[in-house]
Image: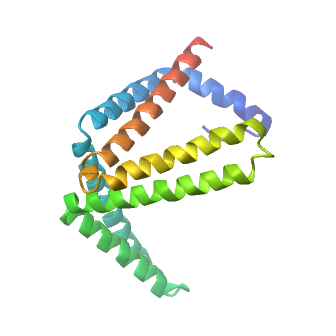
Amino acid sequence: MPLPDDPDDFPLRMRAAVRAHWKVFLIEGILLAILGLAAMVVPPLASLAVTVFLGWMFLVSGVMGLALTFWAREMPGFWWSLISALLALAVGVILLARPVQATLTLTIVVGAYFLAEGATTIMYALEHRRDLSRRWGWMLTAGLMDIVIAALILAGLPGSAAWAIGVLVGINLLFGGATLIGLALAARNA
């Protein structure tokens, strides 16, 4: 769909496109919701699948990065680009060579991320409690929930590596699917 000449026309054209293809959004939403439920039912398999997927992403990224680095070797930053590509390649190989151990490492990183995100969100909420009036409480609650999730993940190591990533990906897929289903049904009824 080409961009409209008039930017004010864009929302109307977007709504028309969604309405015209609501069945595709519905099918994708149902598929994502089913995959999300499957990931939550069998989280060890989903965690392993995510690790292998990330391994392949890093591997392909590293190979492409190497090719592009050598293709444009006259460009400034050659050595930094080379180091970045080699790092991506190495991470991909490690993730694919030892996916079970890599899942543990990814779980630790996810736990640390939730801990940092929770602390940052709490500080943001406290900093803006006057500006955000009643909404700062929701932000504070979100930060506290992030810290609770981090504590569950990190305190449960190494056992939490079997379920944490799979459950989190499953929840994400389920909510993404539910959102697309809602969008499709609203577009159909519009």
Q: How is the image coloured?
A: rainbow
Q: Indicate the quadrant containing the N terminus: top left, top right, bottom left or bottom right.
A: top right
Residue 71 appears in the picture as rendered = no
Q: Indicate the quadrant containing the C terminus: top left, top right, bottom left or bottom right.
A: top right
Query: Within the image, what quadrant is residue 70 found in?
Result: bottom left
On the rendered structure, is 86 left or right of 21? left
Q: Nearer the viewer, residue 125 or 73?
A: 125
Q: Is residue 88 above or below residue 135?
A: below
Point out residue 15 in the picture as x, y percentages from the top left corner.
64, 26
Residue 13 appears in the picture as rendered = yes
> Which residue: 58% across, 12% down?
189
Q: Nearer the viewer, residue 163 or 125?
A: 125
> Which residue: 41% across, 72% down?
65
Point out residue 31 in the picture as x, y percentages from the top left corner.
36, 29
Point out residue 120 in the picture as x, y percentages from the top left corner.
60, 57
Q: Going by the picture, which residue comes out furthest to the top?
A: 189
Q: Is residue 117 above or below residue 83?
A: above
Query: Within the image, what quadrant is residue 133 found in?
Result: top right
